[in-house]
Image (cartoon, rainbow, N blue to C red):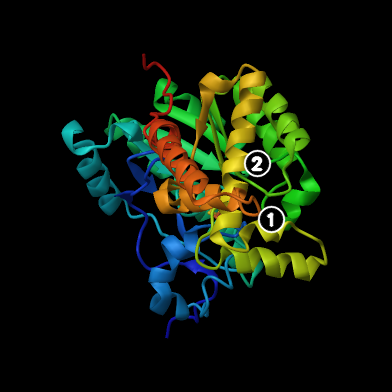
Protein backbone atom coordinates (compact mmCIF):
# COMPACT_ATOMS: atom_id res chain seq x y z
CA UNK A 1 0.00 0.00 0.00
CA UNK A 2 1.42 3.40 -0.96
CA UNK A 3 1.96 5.93 1.90
CA UNK A 4 -0.75 8.61 2.31
CA UNK A 5 -0.20 11.75 0.30
CA UNK A 6 0.33 15.08 2.05
CA UNK A 7 0.29 18.77 0.99
CA UNK A 8 4.07 18.82 0.40
CA UNK A 9 4.71 15.77 -1.70
CA UNK A 10 5.38 14.54 -5.22
CA UNK A 11 2.75 15.19 -7.88
CA UNK A 12 1.91 12.29 -10.11
CA UNK A 13 2.64 13.87 -13.46
CA UNK A 14 6.17 14.95 -14.46
CA UNK A 15 7.37 18.47 -15.23
CA UNK A 16 7.37 19.33 -18.92
CA UNK A 17 7.56 22.43 -21.08
CA UNK A 18 4.06 23.65 -21.90
CA UNK A 19 2.88 26.63 -23.90
CA UNK A 20 1.53 29.39 -21.75
CA UNK A 21 -1.22 31.86 -22.36
CA UNK A 22 0.24 35.11 -21.10
CA UNK A 23 -1.55 38.03 -22.64
CA UNK A 24 0.03 41.44 -22.80
CA UNK A 25 2.96 40.57 -20.54
CA UNK A 26 5.75 39.71 -22.96
CA UNK A 27 7.31 37.17 -20.63
CA UNK A 28 7.63 33.92 -22.57
CA UNK A 29 6.10 31.50 -25.05
CA UNK A 30 6.36 28.49 -22.75
CA UNK A 31 6.56 27.72 -19.07
CA UNK A 32 8.25 25.04 -17.03
CA UNK A 33 6.39 24.72 -13.74
CA UNK A 34 8.06 22.62 -11.10
CA UNK A 35 5.06 22.14 -8.82
CA UNK A 36 1.34 22.52 -8.26
CA UNK A 37 1.00 25.11 -5.51
CA UNK A 38 3.66 27.41 -4.09
CA UNK A 39 5.08 27.66 -0.58
CA UNK A 40 5.59 31.43 -0.80
CA UNK A 41 1.91 32.00 -0.03
CA UNK A 42 1.58 35.46 -1.59
CA UNK A 43 -1.87 36.71 -0.61
CA UNK A 44 -2.52 38.41 -3.96
CA UNK A 45 -1.35 35.45 -6.05
CA UNK A 46 -3.41 34.98 -9.24
CA UNK A 47 -2.46 31.34 -9.72
CA UNK A 48 -5.19 29.57 -7.71
CA UNK A 49 -7.89 31.06 -9.91
CA UNK A 50 -5.90 30.70 -13.11
CA UNK A 51 -4.59 27.18 -12.84
CA UNK A 52 -4.63 25.37 -9.54
CA UNK A 53 -8.37 25.31 -9.00
CA UNK A 54 -8.64 23.21 -12.14
CA UNK A 55 -6.72 20.46 -10.32
CA UNK A 56 -9.34 20.34 -7.53
CA UNK A 57 -10.24 16.62 -7.48
CA UNK A 58 -6.60 15.56 -7.68
CA UNK A 59 -5.52 18.03 -5.00
CA UNK A 60 -8.14 16.55 -2.67
CA UNK A 61 -6.14 13.32 -2.69
CA UNK A 62 -3.33 15.28 -1.02
CA UNK A 63 -5.64 16.69 1.64
CA UNK A 64 -6.07 20.03 -0.15
CA UNK A 65 -9.80 20.65 -0.37
CA UNK A 66 -9.90 24.45 -0.81
CA UNK A 67 -6.91 25.40 -2.99
CA UNK A 68 -7.67 29.11 -2.88
CA UNK A 69 -8.08 29.31 0.89
CA UNK A 70 -5.16 26.97 1.47
CA UNK A 71 -2.87 28.75 -0.99
CA UNK A 72 0.70 28.65 0.34
CA UNK A 73 0.08 25.56 2.49
CA UNK A 74 0.71 23.06 -0.29
CA UNK A 75 3.20 22.49 -3.07
CA UNK A 76 3.39 19.26 -4.99
CA UNK A 77 6.62 18.73 -6.80
CA UNK A 78 6.47 17.36 -10.30
CA UNK A 79 8.97 14.53 -10.82
CA UNK A 80 11.69 14.52 -13.47
CA UNK A 81 11.06 12.27 -16.46
CA UNK A 82 13.79 12.81 -19.02
CA UNK A 83 11.96 11.15 -21.90
CA UNK A 84 8.81 13.19 -21.43
CA UNK A 85 10.76 16.39 -20.84
CA UNK A 86 12.83 15.94 -24.01
CA UNK A 87 9.68 15.24 -26.03
CA UNK A 88 8.15 18.50 -24.78
CA UNK A 89 11.41 20.32 -25.50
CA UNK A 90 11.50 18.97 -29.05
CA UNK A 91 7.92 20.05 -29.64
CA UNK A 92 8.69 23.58 -28.42
CA UNK A 93 11.94 23.79 -30.36
CA UNK A 94 10.24 22.73 -33.59
CA UNK A 95 7.35 25.18 -33.30
CA UNK A 96 7.59 27.42 -36.35
CA UNK A 97 8.19 31.10 -35.67
CA UNK A 98 4.93 31.89 -37.48
CA UNK A 99 3.01 29.99 -34.79
CA UNK A 100 4.62 31.91 -31.93
CA UNK A 101 3.73 35.25 -30.42
CA UNK A 102 6.73 37.51 -30.97
CA UNK A 103 6.40 39.02 -27.52
CA UNK A 104 7.40 35.70 -25.96
CA UNK A 105 11.02 36.05 -27.15
CA UNK A 106 11.09 32.25 -27.76
CA UNK A 107 11.62 31.86 -24.04
CA UNK A 108 10.69 29.19 -21.53
CA UNK A 109 9.75 30.72 -18.20
CA UNK A 110 10.84 29.15 -14.90
CA UNK A 111 8.11 29.39 -13.58
CA UNK A 112 4.72 30.94 -14.37
CA UNK A 113 2.45 29.29 -11.77
CA UNK A 114 4.90 28.66 -8.94
CA UNK A 115 8.40 29.66 -7.81
CA UNK A 116 11.37 27.63 -9.11
CA UNK A 117 13.43 28.22 -5.94
CA UNK A 118 10.84 27.80 -3.19
CA UNK A 119 11.43 25.45 -0.26
CA UNK A 120 9.32 22.41 0.54
CA UNK A 121 8.43 21.52 4.12
CA UNK A 122 6.99 18.02 4.46
CA UNK A 123 5.90 16.19 7.61
CA UNK A 124 9.28 14.49 8.17
CA UNK A 125 12.86 15.80 7.82
CA UNK A 126 13.67 12.93 5.44
CA UNK A 127 10.88 13.80 3.03
CA UNK A 128 11.61 17.53 3.31
CA UNK A 129 15.22 16.86 2.32
CA UNK A 130 14.19 14.61 -0.55
CA UNK A 131 11.73 17.15 -1.95
CA UNK A 132 14.19 20.05 -1.78
CA UNK A 133 16.98 17.99 -3.33
CA UNK A 134 14.66 16.75 -6.07
CA UNK A 135 13.41 20.29 -6.80
CA UNK A 136 16.97 21.61 -7.22
CA UNK A 137 17.85 18.67 -9.49
CA UNK A 138 14.65 19.11 -11.50
CA UNK A 139 15.47 22.75 -12.31
CA UNK A 140 19.08 21.94 -13.18
CA UNK A 141 18.21 18.92 -15.35
CA UNK A 142 15.68 20.98 -17.28
CA UNK A 143 18.05 23.91 -17.74
CA UNK A 144 20.91 21.73 -18.96
CA UNK A 145 18.62 19.92 -21.41
CA UNK A 146 17.29 23.21 -22.79
CA UNK A 147 20.82 24.57 -23.14
CA UNK A 148 22.23 21.47 -24.83
CA UNK A 149 19.29 20.22 -26.92
CA UNK A 150 17.59 23.38 -28.13
CA UNK A 151 17.99 26.97 -29.19
CA UNK A 152 15.27 28.20 -26.84
CA UNK A 153 15.77 31.08 -24.42
CA UNK A 154 15.10 30.94 -20.70
CA UNK A 155 13.50 33.47 -18.36
CA UNK A 156 13.96 32.85 -14.63
CA UNK A 157 11.54 34.59 -12.26
CA UNK A 158 11.81 34.01 -8.53
CA UNK A 159 11.53 35.58 -5.09
CA UNK A 160 14.21 33.37 -3.58
CA UNK A 161 17.94 33.92 -3.02
CA UNK A 162 18.42 30.14 -3.47
CA UNK A 163 18.67 30.93 -7.17
CA UNK A 164 22.25 32.08 -6.59
CA UNK A 165 23.26 28.39 -6.35
CA UNK A 166 22.57 28.18 -10.08
CA UNK A 167 24.26 31.42 -11.18
CA UNK A 168 27.22 29.54 -12.71
CA UNK A 169 24.80 27.42 -14.73
CA UNK A 170 22.81 30.50 -15.80
CA UNK A 171 26.04 32.08 -16.99
CA UNK A 172 26.68 29.22 -19.43
CA UNK A 173 23.59 30.31 -21.39
CA UNK A 174 25.12 33.66 -22.38
CA UNK A 175 22.48 35.81 -24.07
CA UNK A 176 19.94 32.99 -23.95
CA UNK A 177 18.98 33.52 -20.31
CA UNK A 178 17.62 36.44 -18.32
CA UNK A 179 17.35 36.36 -14.56
CA UNK A 180 14.70 38.32 -12.70
CA UNK A 181 13.18 38.71 -9.28
CA UNK A 182 9.87 40.09 -8.07
CA UNK A 183 10.57 43.20 -6.04
CA UNK A 184 7.42 45.27 -5.44
CA UNK A 185 8.87 47.14 -2.46
CA UNK A 186 11.95 47.25 -0.25
CA UNK A 187 9.80 47.38 2.87
CA UNK A 188 10.41 44.01 4.58
CA UNK A 189 7.60 44.51 7.11
CA UNK A 190 4.95 45.24 4.52
CA UNK A 191 6.18 42.42 2.32
CA UNK A 192 5.68 40.03 5.24
CA UNK A 193 1.98 40.91 5.17
CA UNK A 194 1.43 40.45 1.46
CA UNK A 195 4.04 37.74 0.79
CA UNK A 196 4.21 36.02 4.21
CA UNK A 197 6.45 33.09 3.36
CA UNK A 198 8.60 34.59 0.62
CA UNK A 199 12.16 35.73 1.37
CA UNK A 200 12.46 39.40 2.39
CA UNK A 201 12.89 42.05 -0.32
CA UNK A 202 16.25 43.02 1.18
CA UNK A 203 17.49 39.50 0.45
CA UNK A 204 16.07 39.65 -3.06
CA UNK A 205 17.83 42.92 -3.75
CA UNK A 206 21.13 41.43 -2.58
CA UNK A 207 20.54 38.44 -4.86
CA UNK A 208 19.89 40.73 -7.81
CA UNK A 209 23.08 42.64 -7.02
CA UNK A 210 25.02 39.37 -6.92
CA UNK A 211 23.46 38.30 -10.21
CA UNK A 212 24.55 41.56 -11.78
CA UNK A 213 28.06 41.17 -10.36
CA UNK A 214 28.15 37.61 -11.76
CA UNK A 215 27.54 39.06 -15.24
CA UNK A 216 23.96 37.84 -15.70
CA UNK A 217 21.32 39.71 -17.68
CA UNK A 218 19.04 41.01 -14.97
CA UNK A 219 15.45 42.26 -15.04
CA UNK A 220 13.09 43.20 -12.22
CA UNK A 221 9.35 42.72 -11.76
CA UNK A 222 7.90 45.42 -9.49
CA UNK A 223 4.90 43.20 -9.39
CA UNK A 224 2.53 43.58 -7.94
CA UNK A 225 3.01 46.79 -5.99
CA UNK A 226 0.66 47.14 -3.01
CA UNK A 227 -1.94 49.88 -2.44
CA UNK A 228 0.30 51.14 0.41
CA UNK A 229 3.25 51.69 -1.95
CA UNK A 230 3.25 55.49 -2.13
CA UNK A 231 5.54 57.73 -4.16
CA UNK A 232 8.31 57.62 -1.53
CA UNK A 233 8.21 53.82 -1.37
CA UNK A 234 8.17 53.42 -5.15
CA UNK A 235 10.97 55.95 -5.59
CA UNK A 236 13.06 54.09 -3.03
CA UNK A 237 12.55 50.80 -4.89
CA UNK A 238 13.24 52.37 -8.28
CA UNK A 239 16.44 53.97 -6.97
CA UNK A 240 17.79 50.58 -5.91
CA UNK A 241 16.66 49.05 -9.21
CA UNK A 242 18.37 51.77 -11.21
CA UNK A 243 21.76 50.74 -9.81
CA UNK A 244 21.21 47.27 -11.30
CA UNK A 245 20.76 48.72 -14.78
CA UNK A 246 18.16 46.00 -15.57
CA UNK A 247 17.22 45.20 -19.15
CA UNK A 248 13.50 45.54 -18.25
CA UNK A 249 11.48 46.75 -15.29
CA UNK A 250 8.00 45.26 -15.33
CA UNK A 251 5.30 46.85 -13.21
CA UNK A 252 1.72 46.14 -12.26
CA UNK A 253 -0.53 46.89 -9.28
CA UNK A 254 -2.57 44.14 -7.62
CA UNK A 255 -5.33 42.93 -9.92
CA UNK A 256 -8.51 41.37 -8.60
CA UNK A 257 -8.63 37.64 -9.26
CA UNK A 258 -11.13 35.18 -7.79
CA UNK A 259 -10.54 35.06 -4.04
CA UNK A 260 -7.33 37.07 -3.74
CA UNK A 261 -8.98 40.10 -2.14
CA UNK A 262 -10.52 37.85 0.53
CA UNK A 263 -7.07 36.37 1.18
CA UNK A 264 -5.58 39.87 1.59
CA UNK A 265 -8.41 40.92 3.94
CA UNK A 266 -8.07 37.75 6.01
CA UNK A 267 -4.33 38.28 6.35
CA UNK A 268 -4.84 41.88 7.52
CA UNK A 269 -7.39 40.69 10.10
CA UNK A 270 -5.13 37.86 11.26
CA UNK A 271 -2.18 40.18 11.80
CA UNK A 272 -4.40 42.96 13.12
CA UNK A 273 -2.93 45.45 10.67
CA UNK A 274 -4.77 48.08 8.71
CA UNK A 275 -4.40 47.69 4.96
CA UNK A 276 -5.84 49.88 2.28
CA UNK A 277 -8.33 47.26 1.12
CA UNK A 278 -10.85 49.99 0.19
CA UNK A 279 -9.24 50.03 -3.24
CA UNK A 280 -10.63 46.54 -3.84
CA UNK A 281 -14.15 47.40 -2.63
CA UNK A 282 -15.59 47.56 -6.15
CA UNK A 283 -14.37 47.61 -9.71
CA UNK A 284 -14.38 51.41 -9.89
CA UNK A 285 -12.25 51.81 -6.75
CA UNK A 286 -9.83 49.18 -8.08
CA UNK A 287 -9.61 50.94 -11.48
CA UNK A 288 -8.70 54.22 -9.81
CA UNK A 289 -6.03 52.52 -7.71
CA UNK A 290 -4.63 50.52 -10.64
CA UNK A 291 -4.47 53.46 -13.04
CA UNK A 292 -3.05 55.69 -10.30
CA UNK A 293 -0.27 53.21 -9.52
CA UNK A 294 0.63 52.68 -13.20
CA UNK A 295 0.68 56.41 -13.80
CA UNK A 296 2.77 57.09 -10.71
CA UNK A 297 5.40 54.51 -11.58
CA UNK A 298 5.54 55.82 -15.13
CA UNK A 299 6.03 59.40 -13.90
CA UNK A 300 8.71 58.39 -11.41
CA UNK A 301 10.55 56.29 -14.00
CA UNK A 302 10.50 59.25 -16.38
CA UNK A 303 11.77 61.61 -13.69
CA UNK A 304 14.57 59.13 -12.92
CA UNK A 305 15.45 58.58 -16.58
CA UNK A 306 14.41 54.92 -16.46
CA UNK A 307 11.33 55.11 -18.66
CA UNK A 308 12.85 53.41 -21.71
CA UNK A 309 13.22 50.17 -19.72
CA UNK A 310 9.84 50.38 -18.03
CA UNK A 311 7.28 47.84 -19.18
CA UNK A 312 3.86 48.46 -17.65
CA UNK A 313 1.31 45.67 -17.41
CA UNK A 314 -2.13 47.32 -17.39
CA UNK A 315 -4.75 44.66 -16.82
CA UNK A 316 -7.11 43.83 -19.68
CA UNK A 317 -10.09 44.94 -17.54
CA UNK A 318 -8.79 48.51 -17.68
CA UNK A 319 -9.66 48.61 -21.39
CA UNK A 320 -13.44 48.62 -20.98
CA UNK A 321 -14.93 51.71 -22.62
CA UNK A 322 -18.06 51.59 -20.45
CA UNK A 323 -15.95 51.46 -17.27
CA UNK A 324 -13.71 54.30 -18.44
CA UNK A 325 -16.72 56.51 -19.14
CA UNK A 326 -18.33 55.55 -15.84
CA UNK A 327 -15.16 56.50 -13.98
CA UNK A 328 -15.02 59.88 -15.72
CA UNK A 329 -18.69 60.50 -14.97
CA UNK A 330 -18.19 59.67 -11.31
CA UNK A 331 -15.49 62.35 -11.14
CA UNK A 332 -18.12 64.90 -12.17
CA UNK A 333 -20.64 63.71 -9.60
CA UNK A 334 -21.80 66.61 -7.48
CA UNK A 335 -21.30 69.19 -10.24
CA UNK A 336 -24.54 70.81 -11.27
CA UNK A 337 -24.38 70.35 -15.03
CA UNK A 338 -27.02 71.14 -17.60
CA UNK A 339 -28.02 68.33 -19.99
CA UNK A 340 -26.07 70.18 -22.71
CA UNK A 341 -22.90 70.31 -20.58
CA UNK A 342 -23.28 66.65 -19.61
CA UNK A 343 -23.53 65.72 -23.29
CA UNK A 344 -20.46 67.79 -24.12
CA UNK A 345 -18.41 66.20 -21.33
CA UNK A 346 -19.53 62.72 -22.41
CA UNK A 347 -18.40 63.49 -25.96
CA UNK A 348 -15.02 64.74 -24.72
CA UNK A 349 -14.57 61.62 -22.57
CA UNK A 350 -15.31 59.41 -25.53
CA UNK A 351 -12.69 61.22 -27.57
CA UNK A 352 -10.17 60.94 -24.73
CA UNK A 353 -10.87 57.21 -24.54
CA UNK A 354 -10.44 56.64 -28.26
CA UNK A 355 -7.58 59.02 -29.02
CA UNK A 356 -5.49 58.89 -25.85
CA UNK A 357 -6.44 56.28 -23.31
CA UNK A 358 -6.91 53.21 -25.52
CA UNK A 359 -3.77 53.94 -27.63
CA UNK A 360 -1.82 54.31 -24.35
CA UNK A 361 -3.08 50.94 -23.11
CA UNK A 362 -2.37 49.28 -26.43
CA UNK A 363 1.17 50.63 -26.53
CA UNK A 364 1.76 48.87 -23.18
CA UNK A 365 -0.11 45.70 -24.09
CA UNK A 366 1.82 45.24 -27.31
CA UNK A 367 5.27 46.24 -26.07
CA UNK A 368 7.87 43.51 -26.64
CA UNK A 369 10.22 43.15 -23.70
CA UNK A 370 13.96 43.51 -24.17
CA UNK A 371 16.14 40.48 -24.82
CA UNK A 372 19.96 40.55 -24.71
CA UNK A 373 21.64 40.73 -28.09
CA UNK A 374 18.41 41.78 -29.84
CA UNK A 375 18.40 45.01 -31.81
S1 LIG B 1 5.88 33.33 -5.56
FE1 LIG B 1 4.56 33.66 -7.35
S2 LIG B 1 3.44 31.74 -7.62
FE2 LIG B 1 4.32 31.73 -5.55
S3 LIG B 1 2.68 32.50 -4.24
FE3 LIG B 1 3.98 34.23 -4.83
S4 LIG B 1 3.02 35.14 -6.66
FE4 LIG B 1 2.16 33.07 -6.37
Mark 1 nearby-residue class (10 Å; few <14, some 14–19, many ≥20)? many
Q: Which residue does the image show at 38% across and 68% down from the upper left?
A: 12
Q: Quadrant of residue 358?
A: top left
The residue that label 1 is drawn on is: 194
Residue 55, which numbered label?
A: none
Q: Is residue 234 above or below residue 71?
A: above
Secondary structure beneath dot 1 equals helix
- Which numbered disc, 2 or 1, marks the residue that appears first in the sequence? 2
Q: Position of residue 189 (x, y in %)?
A: 80, 50
Q: Is residue 309 visible?
A: yes
Q: Is residue 41 visible?
A: no
Of 264 and 328, nearer the camera is: 328
Q: Which residue does the image show at 34% across and 33% down from the upper left?
A: 103
Q: Position of residue 193 (x, y in %)?
A: 74, 57
Q: Quadrant of residue 73?
A: bottom right
Name the quadrant of the C terminus. Answer: top left
Q: Which residue does the image show at 42% across and 46% down from the upper left?
A: 319
Q: CA distance from mark 2 to mark 1?
A: 10 Å
The residue that label 2 is drawn on is: 184
Name the quadrant of the N terminus. Answer: bottom left
Secondary structure beneath dot 2 equals loop
Pointers 2 and 1 in contact (CB under 8 A)?
yes
Q: Position of residue 130 (x, y in %)?
A: 55, 60
Q: Position of residue 279 (x, y in %)?
A: 65, 56
Of 123 and 95, nearer the camera is: 95
Mark 2 nearby-residue class (10 Å; few <14, some 14–19, many ≥20)? many
Count of numbered circles on the image: 2
Of 163 and 280, nearer the camera is: 280
Q: Is mark 2 within 8 Å of ligand 1?
A: no
- Residue 38 relative to residue 194: left or right: left
Of 234 and 45, nearer the camera is: 234
Q: Which residue does the image show at 58% across and 53% down from the upper left?
A: 330
Amino acid sequence: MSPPREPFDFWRRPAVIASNDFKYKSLSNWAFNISVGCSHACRFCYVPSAATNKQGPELAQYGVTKPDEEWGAFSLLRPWDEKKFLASLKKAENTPASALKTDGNRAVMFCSTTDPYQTFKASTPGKTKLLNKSAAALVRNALIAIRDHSTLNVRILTRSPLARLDFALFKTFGDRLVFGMSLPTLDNTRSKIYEPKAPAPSQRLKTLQKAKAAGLHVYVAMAPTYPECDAADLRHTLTAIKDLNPITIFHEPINIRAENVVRIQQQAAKLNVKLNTKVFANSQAWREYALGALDLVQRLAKEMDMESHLHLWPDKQLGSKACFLELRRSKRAGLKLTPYETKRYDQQDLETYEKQYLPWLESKWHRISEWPGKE
